[in-house]
Amino acid sequence: MSKKSTGYNAPVLYRAFAILEEIARFPSDLGISDLSRQLSIPKSTAYGIIQALIEIGALRQNDANKLMLGPTMARLGNQALAGINIRSTARPYMDKLSEESKVTVFMGIFDEHGITIIEKADSPLELKISAPIGTRIPVFAGAAGKVFLAGMRKKMLDKILKERSIQKFTENSITEPEKYRLELEKVRKAGHAYDFEEYIQGVNAISVPLVPDPWGWPAAALWLVGFSRSFYGEKLEQAVDATKQAAAEIEDILKDTTVTGVTINKQG
């Protein structure tokens, strides 16, 4: 791994990336001793770095204790694709969804600090719900939060639910961890999430994952937001079906144009 000096010195980070790059070159061939020897890293140091990378899902071990890249790396790769391809590919579909459903369509990505809106198609109606691109919303915010958390590895989800209390945005918010887990299980099985005035009073939403990786983590999500007095019942269900169809078509396009090694699994 080549590196350019910036005046900062973080040897552990350089070693961690060197380990990741070496494992990417030789997946399932290297153990801790092999990496220590090949990279001239003390075995105790290599062990500590590798255990931390396993803990966050960046690495995993097979039955022979050989190492390979883990689901976190696939997720980050997909999110890198999101910044390059997904916005331009998804925008025509978002415009169509907005025009047909008469609600606002958002697309966002997730990190440990929350959800960031990276694209939107406003409702064509004069009275609408909107937010600027770049707006950040909380981790537990409505349907989009459910979609991202439902695709999360159990250990990571356990950590979030242990360290953070689920915010009570409205009287309809699900704030008890066990009830929230049950809700996420429904989302996993259905492939979409609902929000019935749980994030904003008087507002309903649906959300669908976009470009899930092989472990189910979405690189992004689409969510449609409308006033609860008009966006409910059959209209809501039609929006779910239309959004799932749009997501599948977006994924097909990205799959055809992607030239990286990241595999896109269709969902829903």
Image (spheres, rainbow, N blue to C red):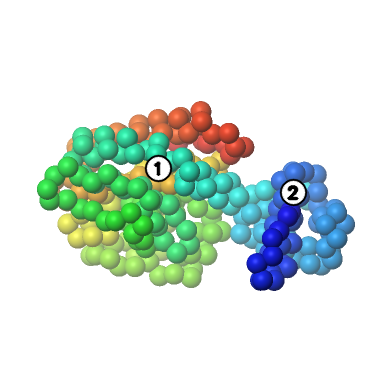
For numbered disc 1, what is the local secondary structure? helix
Picture quarter containing residue 231?
top left
| Left or right relative to 62: residue 83 | left
| Residue 190 visible in the picture | no
Amino acid at the residue labelled 2: Ile
Task: Please give the label number shown on residue 23.
Answer: 2
Identify the residue position indicated by label 1 in the image.
87
Q: Quadrant of the N terminus?
A: bottom right
Q: Few, some or many C-alpha atoms within 10 Å of disc 2 (few <14, some 14-19, many ≥20)? A: many
| Left or right relative to 169: residue 64 | right
Q: Few, some or many C-alpha atoms within 10 Å of disc 1 (few <14, some 14-19, many ≥20)? A: some
As measured in the structure, the alpha-carbon distance from the residue carrying label 2 to the one carrying label 1 is: 31 Å
Q: Eyeballing the image, is 187 above or below 141?
A: above
Q: Eyeballing the image, is 189 above or below 195?
A: above
At x 40%, y 57%, the residue is: 115
Amino acid at the residue labelled 1: Arg
